[in-house]
Amino acid sequence: MGDWSLGNFCIGYAFENVDSAVLQYQNQRLLQQIDKQKHDLQDVEAKIKELKDKQVGCYGLILLGLCAGRSQNALQSLDGADYSRGSIPSCSAEEMFLCRLLQRDSIEANGNDEIAKCVEEALTLHLTSTRELLKLLEHTIYSHREKTESIVHTLDGKISSEGQRFNCKFIAMISSSYLRLMMDRVVKNLREAIDILHVKQLEYADVIRTYLSSQSTDQSEIRRITGELDDSMTELEESRRKLVNLKMQKDVASGMHNLTSGAVKGTHLKNQQKGQ
């Protein structure tokens, strides 16, 4: 009877050792999965940071370089002005691109829809103010042309001599032609500036849509990896508890084994004494 109990104990002890080895193997696998998920999460965060660093643009001061008599190269150089931004807004990293685009320190909005609405309102306001400035500049140019022509007519009326009148008309004609040429050039530059503003508005609208889409995708990926990480941590904690319980059972079984061994030895000793 004692030998049968000892055999069962040995079999149970062997199974406990096997369970402990399996749990340790599972723990190692879970730890490896957790490390991999952490690396994946870090890669996603690094990708987001890289995209945000590349998304540096502005919808800015294209009219500052426009003035009468400027060359065509001066106008073309304005097209690259949005790649030379200086100061960094004091907003969160997720909103830095939009803050720099709108020239704001922060965006008070929650959710992609509110952010998109805020961006559209800001761009519309900026475009409206730019158009008003262009209209004002164009009105100033035409007013200057009218004043110049009025001066020419006044000079033409005050000169009495035919020769002087002819010379004055000739000079006035040349001056008027030169002024018209300059004004036509300025008007042409203004029209090209308006076209650039329109193209930039379309480009930034596409960039904003791409940014919002990529942000939503990245957030979904982060939530997925975070959920997998939480599940793995839960499984790891459950395996740790099982391992602790098995260790406690092993310690109890080891104590029972010592008691059983002592009892068997005592019985064997008594039998030997009776035999003697």
Image (cartoon, helix red, strand yellow):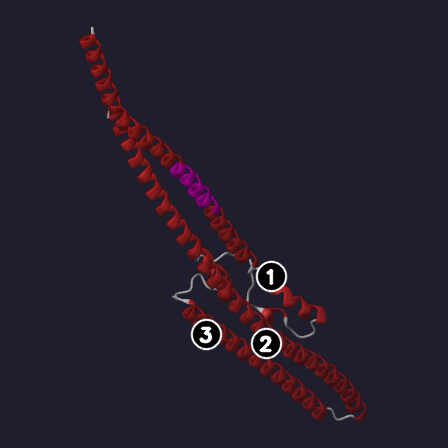
Quadrant placement of the N terminus: top left
Amino acid type, residue under disc 1 in the picture: Tyr
Identify the residue at image location x=36%, y=46%: 235
Identify the residue at image location x=62%, y=85%: 142
Q: Secondary structure at mark 1?
A: helix
As drawn, the residue found furthest toward the right would be 163
User: Residue 102 lies in magenta, yes or no?
Assistant: no
Residue range of the region highlighted in magenta in the rendering: 22-36
Task: Compare marks 1 and 2 and give the one earlier in the sequence.
Answer: 1
- Residue 83's label in the rendered image is 1
Give whichever of 269, 217 is nearer the camera: 269
Give whichever of 259, 120 is nearer the camera: 259
Tag 2: Cα neighbours inside 10 Å, few (<14), some, or many (≥20)?
A: few
- Residue that carries the numbered disc 3 in the rendered image: 121
Amino acid type, residue under disc 3 in the picture: Glu
Tag 1: Cα neighbours inside 10 Å, few (<14), some, or many (≥20)?
A: few
Q: Secondary structure at mark 3?
A: helix
Q: Is residue 273 above or below residue 16?
A: above
- Residue 198's label in the rendered image is 2
In the visual, does 13 lie left or right of 28?
Answer: left
Quadrant placement of the C terminus: top left
Give whichever of 132, 50 is nearer the camera: 50
Quadrant of the rendered image containing residue 86:
bottom right
Q: How many marks?
A: 3
